[in-house]
Image (spheres, coloured by chain):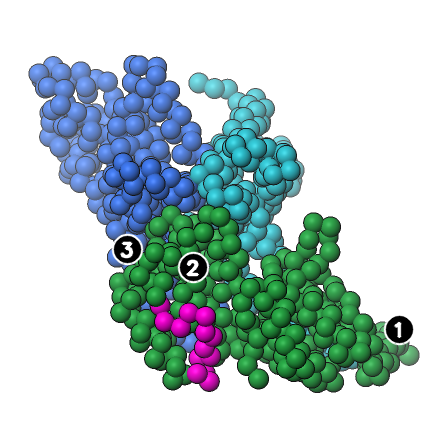
Amino acid sequence: MTIFELIGFGPNGWGLAMLLATAMTIALALCGFSIGCVIGVAVARAKLSKSRLAVVMADFYTTVLRGVPDLLVIYLFYFGLSQFLSGTVTFWCADGGFLLGLLQPSAITPGLCGSRGFIELPRFLIGSLALGVVSGAYQAEVFRGAYGVLSRGQIEAAKAVGMSPFLMFRRIIAPQVLGYAIPGLANVWQLTLKESALVSVIGLVEILRQSQIAANSTFKPFYFYVVAGSLYLAITAVSTYGFSRVEQHSLRGIRRA
Amino acid sequence: MKFSSMLKVVVASTMLIAGAAQAENKWETIRIGTEGAYKPWNFTDASGTVIGFEIDLANSLCARMNAKCEIVAQDWDGIIPALNGGKYDAIMAGMNITDNRLKAIDFSRPYAISTASFGVPKDSPLAALAGTGKNLNLESDAEEVKKVIEEWKPLLEGKTIGFQGGTIIDEFFEAYLKDVFVLRGYKTTEQHDLDLAAGRIDAIFAAQAALTSTFKRPEFSDFVIAGAGIYGDIMGRGIAVGLRKTDPDLKAKFDEAIQSAVEDGTIEQLSQKWFGLSMTPKQ
Amino acid sequence: MDMSYMVDVFLELLSGVPLTIQLVATSTAAGMILGLLLAFMRMSSSAAVRLFAQTYIFVFRGTPLLVQIFLIYYGLGQFHHTLQDIGLWWFFREPYWCAILALTLNTTAYTGEIFRGGLQSVPFPMIEAGRAFGMSRFVLFRRIVFPIALRQALPAYSNEIILMIKATSLASIVTMMEITGLAYKLISETFRAVEVFVCAAAIYLVLTFVITRVVQGLEWWLSPHLRRDPKWMMRRDGDRHYAKSQAASSGGL
């Protein structure tokens, strides 16, 4: 069989499987990135807040998550999350639920409570949470940096014309911070996309895992890892182009030197 | 009476009725959950039907229990919750008895043993590892295990052995063959298969069922299984039917049916048919 | 949390530290040399050389490191007969060398871009001044261009080393038992993911902290003009850049 038959869409080809896996990678990276966005904004706010505790906690979060290998974070979520949830659910079903009287959750969700000690989250959810938590640490730094570029004068001016804090955030702060943040966010997106390959270690069938399956089945690992690499490059190229368009659009009002 | 209290009463009485109905179940139909993706234990053929060793066995067991079998497919991740949730009544999915699982569910007596051996190149000195073709239980054959492993040691000295890391094999090596050879722990069995074929490692240690199906492939025509098949104790107490803790009557029925299937050689015959090796548990 | 268990885990994980450090040190050292080369290629006057460098950077920065490791380890394993024939199999046979090769090629792409940024930030008047002193191209590079470029590039470079420390964890997937490999083994034995994670994270954070400090020290050592008595600077000229160029052009680094 030639390489083109192997990666094509014929009966012996892996083309369709690889395409589906590409969709999974994109979905995973998008979910991880979105979760990271929410975390990033929250942590950036904490870093800029006046509360000493919030600042210390936010710094701790970004230092740890940026200093520890992402693979470890994925293991933590994969093994630790179900360990943690199983503990909580066992309590809820066995003890907590009992205290609440007859209306035990087990009566409503037997599937969840009948299975003490065996709560397993879908791998997709675990993967995107792990990616999101890491991505959030990087996004927090991006948002904080972008906020620092805002000139004080604009905020003072907004206050002077009597804008409410919300209106000021919506009209002055958010559009500009987002605009300045886009190059940084584009970097974090690339990072998240590439890290999504690590989720293959917990068995989620995305590009890399699918290539492994195909490589083993056909005994042609080289071809399939080249295909995997090319798919990532294609996603990278398209998203780089997309981000540059968005950047041009959002910074259209800013004069360039 | 408040609505919420009323609801509680309704739910409670429904549960009582449901419980009573459960107790009266005469097990005329037994629904069996399986994964349908674990060749050759249970897998889905091109037409979408689930077939395999366990499906044949389930039909035979149900006939012995005068019951009708219904096969239900369920992803591995949710296979235990779905049993306890009542989606089916029994699990037959190549599941080993372990302490962790015993916390959640009950098991019948084992209907098969999953043994592990070395896979080596035909022309390697390792092909002479002692005990090939024999199955040894770490618990009940402890003396013989010790003897065989002593015979292995000089051959294995300094070799590089691949295995799937994070599994019971880790524990086995730690307990019986510590520091004899260089360990390479892989994430998946596929990966050590590739490295064995590429000649990066001298041998792999894996489940015999997996080795047999791997070595059937043309790329592995020069590889053989070597050394005794190891099982029992830390290497798994056997493949058994998973059951709800609340159904001791069903467990008794399964135990009896498995006993008779072992005695009349049905299990041996099915195991030869699907695996090409003996996986019958000892009496 | 069970303290004695934590201590056991911690000691077990510590045994993976030497391998992690070896992987980081070897691949960053090799990546530094190759990265410098790549930076020059990227600024070359030949379009073909520039294109090669750009493609290299695009490919290695645009694909996951894990794919690169798999391609080098399992992918090249497909050609083991050929590799044996040309006498390279001893290298590709070992997961250790495959991991180092993948890490090196990967960091080269990032380091190249960092160095290019640093080299391009060297003000031209300094080079002119060096030439006026009659420095040879080599001396000019060694005494003027390289130290200044390195100083400019250091913050970004220290980030890259930290990323490399994290990246070595992927070597565990090709069977290397460094810190993360040991952590995975411990987690799958006991399922006590949180305790193992805390210990492994602590070790990685200490490594990161040490690297950050070393690089800060290097930066301090490369910036003697910023260490002079502040009064001296105030007296001569408030402008630090002036002082910087003074120090550099007199070769006083």
Cα separation between marks 2 and 3:
34 Å
Magenta stretch encompasses residue A219: no
Q: Nearer the viewer, residue A143 or C52?
A: C52
Q: In the image, residue B16 lies at what x, y percent?
A: 84, 82
Residue B51 on image: x %, y %: 69, 60
Is B161 on the left-hand or right-hand side of B24?
left
The numbered mark, 2 or 1, whose residue comes first in the sequence reads 1
Read off the residue under disc 3.
C19
Q: Nearer the viewer, mark 2 or mark 1?
A: 2
In the rendering, at what x and y percent does residue C43 appear?
30, 20
Subunit that carries the residue with mark 1: B
Residue under the image location 35 percent in, 42 percent down: C80
Of residues B106 and B96, the one nearer the viewer is B96
**Which kind of residue does numbered mark 3 sit on?**
Leu
Residue B24 appearing in the image:
yes
- Gap between marks 2 and 1 measured at Cα: 70 Å
* Image height of A227 relative to A218, above or below: above
Residue under label 1, please give it. B3
Magenta stretch in the rendered image: B129-141
| Label 2 secondary element | strand
The chain in cyan: A
Dot 3 lies on which element?
helix
Q: Which residue is mark 2?
A: B224
